[in-house]
Amino acid sequence: PQPIYLSDYRPPAYRVTRTELTFDLDPNATRVKARLHVERHPEREAGVPLELDGEQLALKAIAIDGQPLAPDEYQVGEAGLVVHRVPEAFLLDTEVEIAPDGNTALSGLYRSSGMFCTQCEAEGFRRITFYPDRPDVMATFSTTVIGRTAQEPVLLSNGNPVERGELPGGRHFVTWEDPHPKPSYLFALVAGDLRKVEDTFTTVGGRDVTLQIWVEEENLDKTNHAMASLKRAMRWDEEAYGREYDLDLFMIVAVNDFNMGAMENKGLNIFNSAAVLTHPHTATDAAFQRVEGIVAHEYFHNWSGNRVTCRDWFQLSLKEGFTVFRDQCFSAETNSAPVKRIEDVSFFRTAQFAEDAGPTAHPVRPDHYIEIGNFYTLTIYEKGAEIVRMLSNLVGKEAFRRGSDLYFARFDGQAVTIEDFVGCMAEASGQDLTQFMLWYSQAGTPEIDAHGEYDYANAEYRLILRQRTPATPGQPDKQALHIPVRLGLVGTKSGRDLPLTLDGETLGTDAVIHLREEEQEFLFTDVSEAPVPSLLRGFSAPVKLHFPYAREDLAFLQANDSDGFNRWDAGQRLALLALDDLIAAHRNGVEKVMDQRVVEAFRALLAAETDDKAVLAQMLTLPSEAYIAEQQPLVDVDAIHAARTFVKQSLALALRDDFLRVYEAHRIDAPYAPEPEQIAARSLKNVALSYLMAIEDEAGLEFAREQFEADHNMTDVRHALTLLVHSSRGDIAAPALKAFGETWAHDPLVMDQWFAIQVTRPQSDVLDRVTFLMEHPAFSLKNPNKVRALIGTFANQNPVNFHRADGAGYRLLADTVIELNRLNPEIAARLVTPLTRWARFDETRQALMKGELERIRAEELSPNVYEVVEKALA
Ligand code: HT7
Ligand code: ZN
């Protein structure tokens, strides 16, 4: 497969202004008729052949302006159709046959649990009909769907239904009209035996919008939270961005087989059922929050992505980074803002930093790709969102809003670039963002080495910042970025933020300084007492910050920093220093000794009367094994696991009574509600329980057993069951696990959790369990949720067992990737990721991991898996 380059972009030779489709649905032989209104693009030369994308389509008929084409007038190949000579403007009619039931890749038209559905982003529409399947071709669509009245009573597509009727042979049809021009990737069709929950939303302009959530009958009781989230998101987008919904109908459909979380098709969002269905007994607090975030994200795309779309797929972060930023702000407002930031940054620093340091590292706007499906990454989404967040902070809230208003007004109905977006921000703020644009083109995580000195005699604090970005594949040399560093100086005597004066300018007590050079010095004057610097507050830029903090300084910041995020971060840094010592002790076979400063910091946290229980729960949570690994020069999974377990047990032994007290004080008797206060109390109680269970304390075991049996809500049940399954008490865990599996055998989303709980168990018998569960009747390689729950969770969240020294974990993953490569290349390419990180491990493991990658490479590979494996072995 050949790469595609951003620098080769040209407008399409022909554009399509209107697309009329008729689907005659059949599981094995669906007929798709397409009438395209085509005209030459005004910027392109005349006389160019018409090239349409098309994959796995059997062409049955083709005509131009009503005249069937002779065989020598066109050519059909593996990738599409070429018509050698066409007029300047014309009607193209084609008819193709496709086989939805044979479509296990879940791209194009496929069937899920008997229901027809589509996934067209990024390049799935070409599996439905011959088309210029690129986002800069925007047309209005009319879609007629014909199905069997009994099996497919519900026939949906984009826009508004305009006609429906019965047909001979037990069939019926509905015609949909979407008035908004859209690219093919936003096309959607759903047909099946579905039920709906309906509500209405009155827009700020006074229009009533019908809201529908379509599900299988047994899930009708699991839609309330998604509906409430949708209405909140619609109102928020009006208030925060002035964006009003633009159709009379907005539909969400839940499907069981889906490659990602959800898809923002115009007026007809299709969701992975895991991203929309919730019920207190089946979904955890985290799942409720995830659903709220994804419902909002897809809704927000209606403007950031649909009304204003991407010129080409290199601009993917234009819609994804901006929309993730929008959904993060929305969730921060509806939940605990500091906790939302802590969770997002924790995840980012663990997973995106690892991606940016690995062989598949790429810029937020890549300059080439083989398979765009491989670029729905943490870099495009999450780093893209961090860049938009930096922009918003740089230009300020008001200018950012003016910039986004300008962007939506100027580019409505167009397919545009990242320059267009940043250009609006520059215009609205009057700022020069030229250097800032480097964030989009330069891959890798910048690192800042910071040093500070307090000059007592002159009351000055000198801060020196040095930046460097490590080389990444294809980018050996890096330039200095414009990095906004938010900071404060916390007085060691007063425990307060000191006033900041820089270059004679008074900045308040919390300010942003701009690092633009490789090295820059900042001299703060009138600093009345020795400070500890609180740097990169709120994670003001997606960088790694190194500062030689003494442990006492970190304990001080954890107790005194006015920035909640940095208080949490100081605690994490303190724990990491202790963990470093213990990892070294474990590797050297030396006795492990607990750092009492960490114990005292935890004691103080537990004793403090803090109102923000959600933040407290975060502060009591140790860095994950994956994040600890991210900090190590060479990853030793066993030493990391041993060190973290030792810290947890030491804290539990030293603070047992505090954890018991916290657990008991935060039990909730009220009916379950996914509200911030309850979520905070549950998370605090469950953190306390996890410490008690780390030492298998008798009272802790009893609490866990009670909590599981009380069956109050899935958050508590799942947490208790996980702790039991991860403990040595098989006598309690085995019957609980069995009961859980039997109770929920009918619910695929709960069975996913049942799989995940078992395969995160740290004990060494887990690999046999994974193999055994792959044969379980509830497991299927064809269902991405099952693959993620069982294999993905094992490979990503059970480091000690996945990285077993005998390589059995690697072998299992490679075997699965090889099988999935044939069934579902997108999922296969994502699943292979942990093997691509071989460079972080010891030589023996490196050899084993590379051996498995080579075994995969020897197969006949999809472009998706080929691209990832080639990069990993380069
Ligand atoms: N924009 C959507 C992307 C998506 C997708 C991409 C490739 C393969 C399958 C897919 N399903 C959804 C999701 C989003 O970011 O909102
Ligand atoms: Zn998105």
Image (cartoon, rainbow, N blue to C red):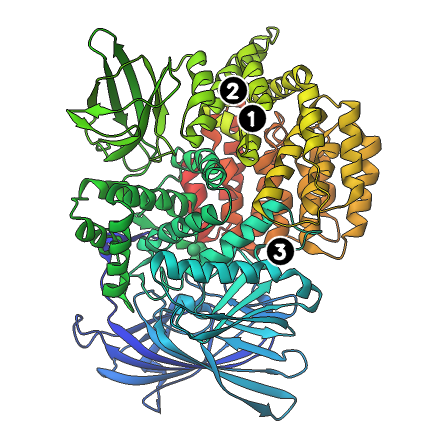
**Nearest-to-viewer mark from 1 and 3:** 1
Could you tell me if residue 865 is visible in this image? no
Q: Which part of the image, by quadrant, shows the C terminus?
A: top left
Q: Which residue is mark 3?
A: 783
Q: Earlier in the sequence, mark 2 or mark 1?
A: 2
Query: How many tags in the picture?
Result: 3
Residue at 34% from the left image edge and 29% from the top image edge: 536
Residue 714: horizontal and vertical position, in percent? 70, 46
Are dots 2 and 1 in contact, CB under 8 Å?
yes
Where disc 3 sits, the SS reads: loop
Could you tell me if residue 683 is visible in this image? yes
Residue at 67% from the left image edge and 55% from the top image edge: 279
For residue 371, above or below residue 688: below
Question: Depth check: 791 or 302 in front?
Answer: 302
Q: Amino acid at mark 1?
A: Leu
Label 2 CA crowd tier, 10 Å (few <14, some 14–19, many 20+): many
Q: Amino acid at mark 2?
A: Ala
Q: Quadrant of residue 120?
A: bottom left
Residue 534: horizontal and vertical position, in percent? 36, 24
Q: Which residue is mark 1?
A: 622
Q: Quadrant of residue 636?
A: top right
